[in-house]
Amino acid sequence: MEQGFSEWEDLGRLILLSILPALVVSAFILSVRWRLKVKQDGSRGQVP
């Protein structure tokens, strides 16, 4: 029983360490895209 729990713990740690960097990278990409979109919209509004 204890060995089975250890395997689940290792599996959870592997999943966490795989998902966490992916979330950080996707949040960074979305942030950059959002800033570019806001920058383009702002420049359009200022041009007569």
Image: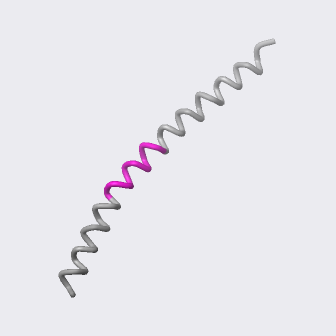
Q: Is residue 25 magenta?
A: yes
Q: What is the total number of numbered labels drawn onto the structure image?
A: 0
- Residue at left offset 28%, top offset 74%: 8
Residue 44, position in %: x, y? 73, 19
Residue 6, position in %: x, y? 22, 77
Q: Is residue 17 left or right of residue 31?
A: left
User: Quadrant location of the N terminus?
Assistant: bottom left
User: Quadrant location of the C terminus?
Assistant: top right
Identify the residue at the far bottom of this view.
1
- Residue at left offset 43%, top offset 47%: 24
Q: Is residue 22 magenta?
A: yes
Q: Is residue 32 left or right of residue 39?
A: left
Q: Is residue 45 left or right of residue 12?
A: right
Q: Is residue 35 above or below residue 9?
A: above
Identify the residue at the far right of this view.
48
- Residue at left offset 54%, top offset 38%: 31
Q: Is residue 43 above or below residue 17?
A: above
Judged by its main secondary structure, the magenta piece is helix
Q: Is residue 18 above or below residue 12?
A: above
Magenta residues span 17-26
Residue situated in front as seen by the camera: 40 or 15 = 15
Residue 21, position in %: x, y? 37, 49
Identify the residue at the far left of this view.
3
How is this picture coloured?
one colour
Location of residue 33 (image quadrant): top right
